Image: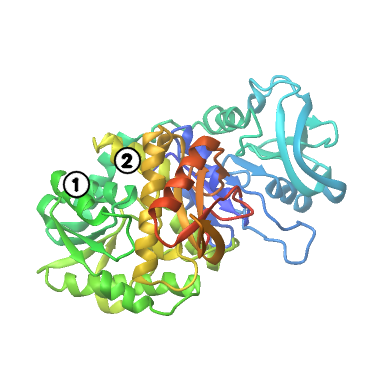
Amino acid sequence: MQNKVLILDFGSQYTQLIARRVRELLIYSEIYPFNNPPTDLTEFNAVILSGSPYSVRSDDAPHPDLIGIKGKLPLLAVCYGAQYLSHFYGGIVKPSDLREYGRANLSHVKSNETFLEGIEVGSQVWMSHSDTIDKLPKEGILLASTQDITNAAFRLEGESTYGIQFHPEVYHTLDGKKLLENFLIKIAGLSQDWTPDSFVERTINQVRENIGSEKVIMGLSGGVDSTVAGVLLNKAIGDQLQCVFVNNGLLRKNEFNSVLNQYKGMGLNVIGLDASNQFLEALKGESDPERKRKIIGNTFIDVFDEESKKIEGAKWLGQGTIYPDVIESISVNGPSATIKSHHNVGGLPDYMKLKLVEPLKMLFKDEVRRVGASLEIDSELLGRHPFPGPGLGIRILGNITAEKVKMLQEVDAIFIDGLKSWGLYDSVWQAGAMLLPVNSVGVMGDERTYEKCVALRAVQSTDGMTADWVDLPHTFLQKISNEIINKVKGVNRVVYDISSKPPATIEWE
């Protein structure tokens, strides 16, 4: 695939945002760890260097190999990247007198520069660094400044190399998208051809070429990712695809039957398999969240492996893996920290002897939904909130029992149904309930109770990397709280989680 942007990741929390902003311009981008770049750079038309938590002055500073990039491909260096270009190419980087973090405004913008077309003095940018560029390299030409940062943006004479000490990928930089557009389209000359329709067409051709006449078995979860992946594979290979929908006993209330019927109505060849007892037995007595994830993942593999043996000629395993899963999981061996493992990435044992087909593994969540719309999947299904692969297993803090699962299913159903009936569901990116390992005193009628506490969670996000809590109407929360306590035996207290990500995660485990 030509017309690609390479993003070298130095461990910044914002790296995925860079990729997303590039793709919003309908230009395809891929992220690689700085220490494991692609061997073939001819596939890429431009390169972006990310920020980093490191200082370029430290002994353990990341050192990328730019021999095949700098001066040869259009290069945009962001924050750490810009400081790296200065520090190692003749400039000077010093510790800043004070940490440069947060909003700032451009006080100087060099005129007649393609890189800054449409960006005016006063434009708001977002800073996040503790070092600052004190002196540009000899070839450096100053392009923009803020009141506190003289060298906020620069280019190197004689090459298409640009550096900025602010982050164009975050929404606080109001003209960040315009700056990226200037660099990628006007300077690098890339085409805006990354569309859902082009992705579908390209992927179908690739799948047909790779799969040939062999069969694919795929586990469906009921979520958007696996559904879109299943429909895409079905469009490519038809009856060569056998889908399996496993009930792990940790799904939402009545979800197994309703989703199974929905899949059959979409024309998918799907088997429904109720393995809830097997999962609950495997989880018995386990409270550690990471071990619960691994138990659920391993049990799914065992169940799935057993079922795959019944399907004659199955040579491939289809998965709904998406790009954030891939990035977070490979970062264990790269510069970024992994927060938690993903059950659908790199978890296949050798004994399964199945090749992987992951048609969505280069897409972000919003791109998956756009591809689903291109495939004419029902909008209600595409609009479903994300639901964790381990299901309610990581929303029950502590050990898991059938009684706790049933309790949380009832709580969750009241919350989700309430959001829908109040017209709030589509304004929330993800919502759910957590069963806490906490009993508290309550009064119901004239009787003292000592029962469970549940936490409701609703967040707004784009792809789950960052999230803000949703300020749901207090009258709604009051009604839902009363309904939960009155209808769900064993619950006498409801709280609402108002933490954002970061510092919290969306899920509690």
Mark sitting earlier along the chain (2/1) = 1
Query: Relative to residue 58, is residue 101 depicted above or below?
Result: above
One can see residue 26 in this view: yes
Q: Which residue is mark 2?
A: 382
For this view, does 113 lie left or right of residue 190?
right
| Mark 2: amino acid | Leu
Which of these two is toward me, 264 or 133?
264
Residue 229 is situated, as x and y percent measured from the top left of the image, at: 28, 50
Q: How many marks?
A: 2
Secondary structure of the residue carrying numbered label 2: helix
Residue 288 is situated, as x and y percent measured from the top left of the image, at: 50, 74
For this view, does 1 lie left or right of residue 150?
left
State the colouring used for the structure image: rainbow
Secondary structure of the residue carrying numbered label 1: helix
Query: Relative to residue 187, is residue 484 depicted above or below?
Result: below
| Mark 1: amino acid | Gln
Q: Residue furthest front?
A: 446
Which of these two is toward me, 271 or 68?
271
Q: Contact (CB < 8 A) between labels 2 and 1?
A: no
Q: Quadrant of residue 335?
A: bottom right
For this view, does 312 lie left or right of residue 462?
left
Q: CA distance from mark 2 to mark 1?
A: 13 Å
Image quarter hosting the N terminus: top left
Q: Which residue is mark 1?
A: 262
Residue 76 is situated, as x and y percent measured from the top left of the image, at: 62, 41
Circle 1: is it few (<14), some (14-19), or many (20+) Cα within 10 Å? Answer: few
Residue at 81% of width from left, 41% of height from top? 136
Residue at 34% of width from left, 70% of height from top? 402
Residue at 71% of width from left, 39% of height from top? 166
Which of these two is toward me, 489 or 262?
489
Circle 2: is it few (<14), some (14-19), or many (20+) Cα within 10 Å? Answer: many
Foreground mark, 2 or 1?
A: 1
